Image (spheres, rainbow, N blue to C red):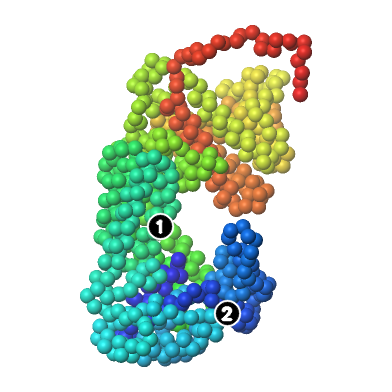
Amino acid sequence: SSGINAECQPIYQEIYQEDNCQGILLVDASNAFNSLNRTTALLNIRHTCPEFSTYLINTYRQPSKLFLPGGAGGHISSREGTTQGDNCASGFYSISTMLMIKELSLIPHIKQIWYADDGGAGGTLDGLRKWWEKILQLGPDIGYFPNSGKTWLVIKPQYIIEAEVLFSDTGINITSEGPAGGQRYLGAALGTPTFIENYVKNKVEKWVDEVEKLSDLAKMEPQLAYSAYTTGLCKRWAYIMRTISGISHLFQPLEDCIKSRFLPAILGGYSFSEADRVIFGLPTRFGGLAIFNPVEVCQLEYEYSTKATNLLKTEILQQKLVMTPQETEEMSSKSKEVKKKISFEKTSHYLKKFLEIKTECPEDKARNLDVLRLKGASSWLTALPLQEFRYTLSKQEFVDAISLRYKFPIKGMPKTCACSKPNSIDHALSCAKGGYTAMRHNQIRNLEASFLQEVCYDVQLEPKLLPLTGETFKLKSANTKPDARSDVSARGVWRTMDKTFLDVRIFHEGNKSNSGPIDKVFAAHEQEKKRTYNERIIEVEKSYFTPLVFSTSGGMGKEAEKFHQRLAKLISNKRNISYSDAISHMRCKLRFSILKTTLTAIRGYRGSAGKWGDTITSDINLIPHERQFF
């Protein structure tokens, strides 16, 4: 998309505004990719791109079979064009047209821009006519057949009569820069401010309609609707934002629909404040929902896109057809630097906004925002709702999870707990009645063991520590019980064949005992675990000890973060996948496990066990002496 953005912007903003430019000719070809002269293209590509030619010749020298539907088993041979679905098709086609583009570049007073089969040129009317005739002459030989019915000439108003005379016999559509003159081009718009404004308004109307339909779906499937919005729908208007400047105000109807329809739908009808809307507009890693306000981000997207494509835009305006390997490498290096700067600018922008919001919030809300910024705390929002990985939530679970994230009241919670104490979210996540705290702990313990089993040896659940035979420890808090155990042990975590003991703790940051800066709370829990196990495991077991401390919000302590980074490296090496994929997967699995057990603790039954049938207390094996073991 970066290349398309760079192409749209200079055509209108640079070339069209030049004094010697009388118009822009936008050419479209008929069935271009399927009409490419394959034989000619394969011969030419040996000279234009020898590095790519061997692969393409091996792939395309024999006709491919296109199987016919209906189960008859018939097929036809594909002898021309590129193969649909081929990753190299776009590159193959672009290189195949290079010889024609070089010939066209010799025409004076013309600046041309090509993106696959979409070509554009700006300049004098005489030059544009010669350029068009040259395409008609050279195009059919390589399988490029210009379609005059879909070709547009965007002309400045003072040259409209001359253009109609000069192009009268071509069948090309002509539009002037009149009150509403312009033309859609590669998903953006070229023409007058009036034309561009009307174009964007029509787009916004369609997007509003789509958001309304998605809001209706969100009432039944809020997680699915949220994922569809953040990973798909909102990307549609991001492209327009990046290619057209000064259109922020046109997105207000879209923001109104998001605020009045979509957000209430995924929040279960909760009435949020303007301050909450600002928070929702932050990225998830800054405590938001990544549901950005389109009015606010529009101009920012354009500015970032302009910076990202400036190098490519300069090359296009200079009409440089061929770049040396050294020039290509230099541009690639500069582009990476620019992207890093843009990424830093984006992060700085949202961090500044986050800090501004935080200073205006009450103390408890400000602390909650710090909690949401912890690594892994928001991974459940960015994960796709895939049943295979158990990343799906029911509509009640999703709404409860959002409410839990922002400390909104949860509908339907009883006022009094089964333990006779006043009920609340903080109490429900700490109350031992019902066994939900133990369930939460055991789920994470088992999940960590499953991670270890893939890359480590001798993985054990609740391994018993070696008995003490007179050893003494400096710390009084050290565990000296004869039946002392840790949660998990494994060999090969930190060093080959060395044993590592792990102990899991999940605390609720909302408890009074866990008040204060969240990083210090994590450190305190880690130190408590170390005081209990570290000395005994190092001195007696001659092994390593790592405390795995998590919060109910999904964050993890520094020791746990280092452990999972190490584990991700081991898994990425074994599976031959990227480290980022491995660590992201682990964080998601951990986050969903904590989230689901947390939601269960809030809604779970804590009353006395009822009798739903006869309870058998005797031995169910009626013939003990005839037991069989398989």
- Could you say where residue 252 lies in the image, as x and y percent from the top left? 26, 56
- Could you say where residue 608 lies in the image, as x and y percent from the top left? 46, 14
Is residue 78 visible in this depiction of the protein? yes
Q: What is the C-alpha distance between the residues marked 1 and 2?
A: 35 Å
- Could you say where residue 466 lies in the image, as x and y percent from the top left? 70, 24
Q: Classify 10 Å Cα crowding around label 1: few (below 14), some (14-19), many (20 and above).
A: few
Q: Which of 200 and 548 is in front in this view?
A: 200
Residue at the spot x=34%, y=51% of the render? 211
Q: Which mark is residue 131?
A: none
Residue pointed to by mark 2 = 37
- In the displayed structure, 30 sits above or below 168; it is above
The kind of residue tagged 1 is Lys
Mark closer to the observer (1, 2): 2
Q: In the rendered structure, are the residues bearing label 1 and label 2 in contact, judged by CB atoms less than 8 Å apart? A: no
Residue found at the very far left of the displayed protein: 179
Say which quadrant the N terminus sits in. bottom left
Q: Classify 10 Å Cα crowding around label 2: few (below 14), some (14-19), many (20 and above).
A: many
Q: Is residue 253 left or right of residue 51?
A: left
Q: Tell me the quarter of the picture where residue 248 sits.
A: bottom left
Residue pointed to by mark 1 = 235
Task: Label 1, secondary structure: give it.
Answer: helix
- In the displayed structure, 156 sits above or below 184; it is below
Residue at the spot x=34%, y=46% of the render? 215
> Could you tell which of marks 1 and 2 lies nearer the N-terminus?
2
The kind of residue tagged 2 is Asn
- In the displayed structure, 453 sits above or below 430; it is below
Task: Label 2, secondary structure: give it.
Answer: loop
Q: In this view, does 597 lie to the left or right of 349?
A: right
Is residue 368 visible in this depiction of the protein? no
